[in-house]
Image (spheres, grey):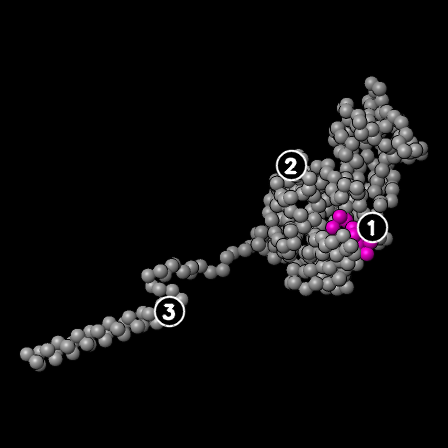
Amino acid sequence: MPGRTVVGLATLSLVLGLVGGFAGDRVSETLRHGRTSDNALPVSTAGPASRPAGSVAALAAAVLPSVVSIEVAGATGVSTGSGFVVREDGYLLTNNHVVAPAAQGAAVTVTFSDGHEVEARLVGRTADYDLAVLKVEETGLTPLVLGDSDQVAVGDAVIAVGAPLGLESTVTTGIVSATHRPVQAGEAAQAAFIDAVQTDAAINPGNSGGPLVDARGEVVGINSAIAQPPGAQQATGSIGLGFAIPSNQARHTTEQLIATGTATYPVIGVLLDGSYRGEGVQVSTTEQQGRAAVTPGGPADAAGIRPGDVILAIDGRPVSRSDELIVAIRAKAPGDAVTLRVRTGDTERDLRVVLDEQASE
């Protein structure tokens, strides 16, 4: 009996030892992986995600190094916005309403996607197009290509890039939801009339001045304004209606600002009657603040337009509001010719008008 007991105890000890060693190995193994075996979850065995050329991720990776966030510190406080590189030698494009305080001496700081900051100076700006050019003392930058906004179609995929609410390197996606949308952008006192590209890509305060790019990564617009519900006192956030200055207009104006620091815009030389409610847009019947309804010797005068005439269409596109006519004209360049459908009394006729030039504010 004593011998059997000893054998039994020895056998039991051996079994416990094996179990203890096995359990210790399991505990050690699970501790090494930071989890218990009972709570272990499946582990991915997939390789890196595929991000082919043309995907949103691939486009974002290509565009982001050329997009900057902008901070303007002036006497009235600090404001932020976005911009992007247009020339490798340090020229950046943004909105006038983002950097307007710089004209009164406010300091402008630009932050690139890699986090480094640099001071920028204001090269030129135009309130009429809500565009401005900055310059930083850096070279070897990668500029974004300004694409052909005339080729943009409703339904095209687009990406908005910028720093909404100060959140740098933010990317949102959507489509072009409309083109040739007449929009007033910028501050109320210096509203710019733009023939806008409309998008449902989320645009929020701080996105202003950033690029709207197409599926090729080319800039088709400069994000400038967002719609707000009736009664809203200020822009609070995206409701799926954002507006961008077409890249073709931005190209012409940016080249002028870099060359001279100022810009011009086309005019036909008439004053419009904002109280008119009939079909088309009416030329004022009287002077306004000492200015003639039709500028003597101006393009409209030379074409035969007279006070009280009604402009029904421009280049075959009907117009029913003053801002529609204004943005359609400003989408052109000085020296371009447009065809206006004009009604005098009961008579309608097409008139060819060569646009004149006026200096921007």
Residue furthest top as drawn:
346
- Relative placement, left or right, of 332 versus 201 is right
Image quadrant occupied by the C terminus? top right
Residue at image coords 77%, 23%? 278
Q: Which comes before the other along the chain, label 3 or label 1?
A: 3
Residue 332 lies, in percent from the top left, at 80, 40
Q: Amino acid at mark 1?
A: Gln
Residue at image coords 72%, 38%? 183
Query: Neighbour class for label 3 at 10 Å: few (<14), some, many (≥20)?
Result: few
Residue pointed to by mark 3? 31
Vertical relation: 119 (above or below) 3 = above
Residue pointed to by mark 1? 256
- Between 118 and 316, the one nearer to me in the picture: 118
**Can residue 60 be seen in this snapshot?**
yes
- Relative placement, left or right, of 317 versus 154 is right
Q: Which residues are magenta?
A: 96-105
Query: Neighbour class for label 1 at 10 Å: few (<14), some, many (≥20)?
Result: some
Q: CA distance from mark 1 to mark 2?
A: 36 Å
Image quadrant occupied by the N terminus? bottom left
Q: Amino acid at mark 2?
A: Pro
Residue furthest front as drawn:
76
Residue 186, by quadrant, is top right
Q: CA distance from mark 3 to mark 2?
A: 56 Å
Q: Quick one: SS at disc 3? A: helix
Residue 341, by quadrant, is top right
